[in-house]
Structures are given as C-alpha cells and as structure tokens.
Image: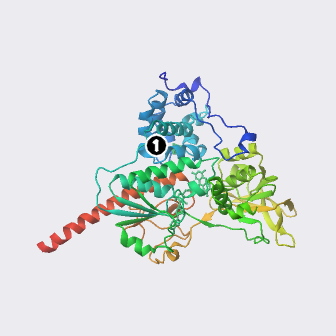
C-alpha cells in the first residue's frame, strides 16, 4: 500500500464509511455502516494534523494514542497500529463503533475546531481492529505464569470484561459472575445490533475464555450465591454490576397494559435477534409491528428504542422529549440516523397522562408543550409547561426511556457495610478505587452512574491495576507477618 503523507486535511474531505440507505436499514438489525476500504481508511487517517497537543487523546477517556495509530494506518503499518491501539483499550473495535465520538475524540479534534471537520477517528479505530481480527493478530492474553491469587468479578459488562483481561494478564485466576445467561452486559442485551452486531461482543468473550477467564453465567450474586461467599472464595472482589433500576413515569395511566420499560423492550428484541424464543415478543406484547409507538425520553436508550420499533415494522414511531434537539442527552449522530429512518421527534413536550380503553390497555398519550425556563444549578434550562397547550397522540405501545439508577446494593448483597453515595452508586476511594470494604473494588456504571462503554473500560482497567497493588501488598505483608512475629 502507498505510504501516505500526513496533514492531508487541506486536500482531502472528511469521509465516513458508507452508510446503508435508510430504506434498507429499516428492514434489518445489521450495522448501518459498511467497512472502510483499506485505501479509504489510510486516506482518512492521513488527514490528521499530528498536532503538538493532541486534544483528541486528551478527550478520549482512555487516553488512546490516536495520532500515532492514525500515522501508522496512513503508512499501511496496520499491525503496529493495532498494537498501539490495543495497548490502551480492551475493545477498540467496540468503542470505534459506539462511542459518541462527536462528544469525545472527534468533537475535540483540532480540525473540527478549525472547521476542517474532524479526522474520522472512531471509524479508523474500528477498521484497525476489525482488520486485526481478520488477520489473526488478536490473541488471548495468556500470562507467563500463574500467581496463585484469585479475583471474583461481579458483572460481565465492559467494565468487568476489561478488568478480567487485565488481571488475567498478570496471572490471576479470574472468575466472572453474571446473572444473565450470556456475558457482555448491555453490549449484549441493551445496545441493538444496528449499532453493534453481537458477534463482535461474542468473539471478545471467547477471547477471554481462551485466556483462561472462567465465566459463571446465570449466577445472580445476592440470590444464587451470597456476597459473603464470594469474598471468602477470592483474594479480591470487583463490583461491576451496572445500573438497572429504570426510572418510571408517574403520570396517570402509567400502569396501563402496553407501557413497557426500555430495557425490557430492547432485551426482548436482542434475544429474538440471537435466536431465543421470547413469548412476550411472540404474543405481540413486546413487538412494535403495526403499532403506534411512543417512546418517552431523549437519551441513547430512547434512540435505540425508536430505531428498534422502526425495524420491527411499527405503523408510526414518535419520540417525545421535554427539551429541544440541542439540549438532548443522546448523540446527535444517532438522532440524525433516527430521523433518516423515519422517526418523528416531538421536541419540547412531556407526557401528562396515558389514556386507556375499557380493557386497561393504552390507546394514547396526552402531552403538554414545554418551553425552556431559567437554568438550574447544573446550568441547564429547566423545561416549563405551557398552559393550555395539551395535545394527544395515538399509542398502542409506550416505552419509558427515562434513565437508570443503581439497585440498592447493600440490601441486595446483604452487606450494610458497603457504602453508597446519595445517588446509590458504590462509593470508592478516588486513589485506591476500593469501596468501604477492604478488598472490594468497584468499576463502571455502578461506581460512576449510567455512563458510556469507554468509561466502563477505563474504570475496569484502573480497578484491575489497583486490585493488583492491593493484593500483592497484602500478600507480601501476610508473608512477612510471621517472620516479624518470630523476630519480636
Ligand atoms: C440501551 C442502551 C444503549 C446504550 N448505548 C450506548 C452507546 O451507544 N455508547 C456507549 O458508549 N454507551 C452506551 N450505553 C451505556 C453503556 O452500555 C454502559 O455505560 C456500559 O455498558 C456500562 O458497563 P458496565 O460494565 O458498568 O455495566 P453493564 O454493561 O450494565 O454490565 C453489568 C453486568 O452486571 C450483571 N449484574 C448486575 N447485577 C448482578 C448481580 N447481582 N450478580 C451477577 N451479575 C450482575 C448484569 O447482568 C450485567 O451483565 C447504552 C446503555 C443502554 C442502556
Ligand atoms: S475510545 Fe472512543 S473516545 Fe477514545 S478514540 Fe476511540 S472512539 Fe474516540
């Protein structure tokens, strides 16, 4: 392959991999972007300015060495690019697919700031690692020697998976316990295939298995095995359980039939996509086909619900959000994709009541228009209802996508000593990442609140490092204790 010079942003336009036409995307759950052609990936990487202070790297939660792997890709040195990229990230092809790059690396790219439009960092990252998989460069992290110590990880989402790989590489016996039948957390059961096809996650899980990580699926810690038992089994425990308590509507009619939580709906759809039999989908309860669907919320979860409903063949899909497009928490890129696929957005509106028929089944959403009032303590303008502006939308399926909170873990684990914040997230020491219980650490959404995959990976890696420091220091202290006792 030709070796590209860098700084080609003055002559080359920004180009993302081809997006499949919306009419085609509506018909299946496959990813919407096709792969980069090798020449195209090298060209796009060569647009990088190689700046002295790489803001892309600073604003990547993992501190990925982006300028270096762009330069290596532009030069056709893909195996080296993969080595650099995978040195800081346990799942670069996953982050490349689903990070909201417009808010992270690409949004901070100096080219974006100077109106030349960002380097397509995420797409190149995906290209590098997909190529590495195809070429057989991705290898299980098998340690040189076992260190005789073990760590139990509760939760097989991205935080748990990243920690597992890091710890296994250091020679720990690593056991991951998950209440689900499949490993992957929200990568498997939350995020739909059109953003992240499942084989991409499954091959990562297999890689960990090949490295010797032991998975215990269908094991709900707190129910199937006690937290105390787990602590007794391992030298350290990592809590990486994510956040799963869905916020729910409180307006009249919220309990009607046909009103569902976002994750219930998405999990059913993901299961069907993986070939599972899901009675609530087969009965039509969790299937949007032929229905008027209203999704309430404006985050990534809401975007995934509306786009899933489109693919299931809904009659109409509306997304109701109480702020405007600029102020919604979801990625702008995902909103644009949803619009292309036929979703109607009802901005600046909030549900006032859900209306039902004699059988207690939802038939409509009565909403009220909002305007943005004065900013609250967080600096965001708070939405205020406009009196007399009520309107009604037909609805046979209403999906609540209002965000998630942590479960009450001290109660669930029967461990009152486990300190939590006022939001219910597990408290950790900011330096050691240890919780209030010695030898118990926390990472990912359960520690920082509902967030992003890239942050979960970062937390998992950091926790693995701190666990290693703690366990090795403790093992050394335990070893020297008898000697000290003898000497004194
Ligand atoms: C619908 C949806 C779409 C999203 N889209 C994006 C996106 O596009 N980009 C992005 O970056 N982020 C996205 N996110 C956020 C992202 O998925 C999370 O931030 C990330 O998965 C958190 O990782 P985690 O490992 O902390 O938790 P999780 O992925 O939630 O994994 C936690 C695991 O712990 C297990 N578990 C929980 N309790 C127990 C227990 N008691 N015993 C055993 N196992 C237990 C669960 O079964 C689960 O497998 C999305 C989230 C949702 C809900
Ligand atoms: S991990 Fe996410 S933020 Fe970091 S470079 Fe990749 S796409 Fe950008």
Instruction: Judge by depth and name the residue closer to the eye, 352 or 472.
Output: 472
- Whether residue 437 is visible here, answered yes or no, is no
x then y, percent, for residue 123:
56, 38
Q: Is residue 14 placed above or below 226 in the rendered structure?
A: above
Residue 165 visible in the displayed image: yes
Q: Quadrant of ligand 1?
A: bottom right
Say which residue label 1 marks.
64
Residue 359 sits in which quadrant? bottom right
Percent coordinates x, y for residue 250 in the rendering: 73, 71
Does label 1 point to a residue whose CB lies under 8 Å from ligand 2?
yes
Residue 440 image point, x, y percent: 40, 67
Q: Is residue 311 left or right of residue 240?
A: right
Residue at 29%, 49% in the rendered image: 144
- Counting labels gives 1
Mark 1, Cα crowd under 10 Å, few <14 / some 14-19 / many 20+, is many
At 49% from the left and 47% from the top, the residue drawn is: 91
Q: Residue at x 55, y 63 (%)?
A: 180
């Amino acid at each position: 392959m030709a070796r590209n010079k860098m700084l080609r942003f003055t002559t080359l336009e920004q180009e993302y991999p081809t997006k499949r036409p919306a009419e085609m995307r509506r018909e299946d759950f496959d990813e919407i972007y096709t792969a980069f052609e090798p020449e195209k990936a090298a060209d796009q990487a060569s647009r990088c300015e190689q700046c002295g202070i790489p803001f892309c790297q600073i604003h990547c939660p993992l501190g990925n060495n982006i300028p270096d792997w762009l330069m290596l890709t532009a030069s056709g040195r893909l195996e080296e690019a993969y080595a650099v990229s995978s040195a800081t990230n346990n799942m670069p092809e996953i982050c490349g697919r689903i990070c909201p790059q417009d808010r992270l690396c690409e949004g901070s790219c100096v080219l974006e700031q100077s109106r030349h439009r960002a380097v397509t960092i995420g797409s190149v990252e995906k290209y590098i690692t997909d190529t590495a998989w195809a070429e057989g460069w991705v290898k299980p992290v098998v340690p040189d020697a076992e260190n005789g110590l073990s760590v139990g990880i509760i939760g097989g989402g991205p935080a748990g998976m990243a920690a597992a790989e890091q710890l296994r590489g250091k020679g720990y016996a690593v056991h991951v316990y998950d209440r689900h039948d499949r490993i992957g957390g929200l990568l498997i059961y939350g995020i739909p295939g059109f953003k992240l096809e499942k084989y991409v996650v499954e091959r990562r899980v297999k890689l960990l298995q090949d490295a010797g990580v032991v998975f215990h699926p269908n094991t709900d810690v707190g129910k199937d095995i006690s937290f105390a038992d787990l602590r007794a089994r391992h030298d350290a425990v990592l809590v990486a359980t994510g956040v799963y308590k869905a916020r729910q509507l409180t307006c009249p009619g919220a309990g009607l039939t046909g009103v569902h939580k976002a994750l219930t709906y998405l999990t059913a759809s993901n299961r069907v996509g993986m070939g599972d039999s899901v009675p609530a989908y087969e009965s039509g309860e969790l299937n949007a086909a032929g229905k008027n669907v209203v999704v309430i919320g404006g985050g990534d979860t809401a975007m995934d619900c509306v786009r899933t409903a489109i693919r299931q063949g809904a009659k109409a899909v509306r997304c109701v959000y109480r702020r405007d497009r600029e102020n919604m928490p979801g990625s702008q890129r995902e909103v644009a994709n949803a619009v292309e696929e036929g979703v109607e957005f009802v901005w600046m509106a909030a549900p006032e009541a859900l209306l039902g028929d004699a059988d207690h089944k939802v038939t409509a959403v009565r909403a009220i228009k909002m305007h943005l009032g004065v900013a609250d303590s967080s600096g965001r303008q708070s939405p205020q209802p406009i009196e007399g502006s009520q309107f009604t939308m037909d609805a046979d399926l209403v999906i609540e996508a209002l965000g998630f909170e942590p479960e009450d873990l001290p109660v669930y684990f029967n461990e009152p000593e486990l300190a939590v914040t006022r939001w219910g997230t597990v408290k950790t020491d900011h330096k050691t990442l240890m919780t209030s219980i010695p030898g118990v650490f926390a990472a990912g959404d359960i520690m920082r609140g509902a967030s992003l995959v890239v942050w979960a990976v970062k937390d998992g890696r950091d926790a693995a490092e701190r666990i290693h420091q703690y366990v090795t220091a403790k093992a050394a202290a335990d070893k020297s204790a008898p000697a000290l006792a003898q000497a004194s």
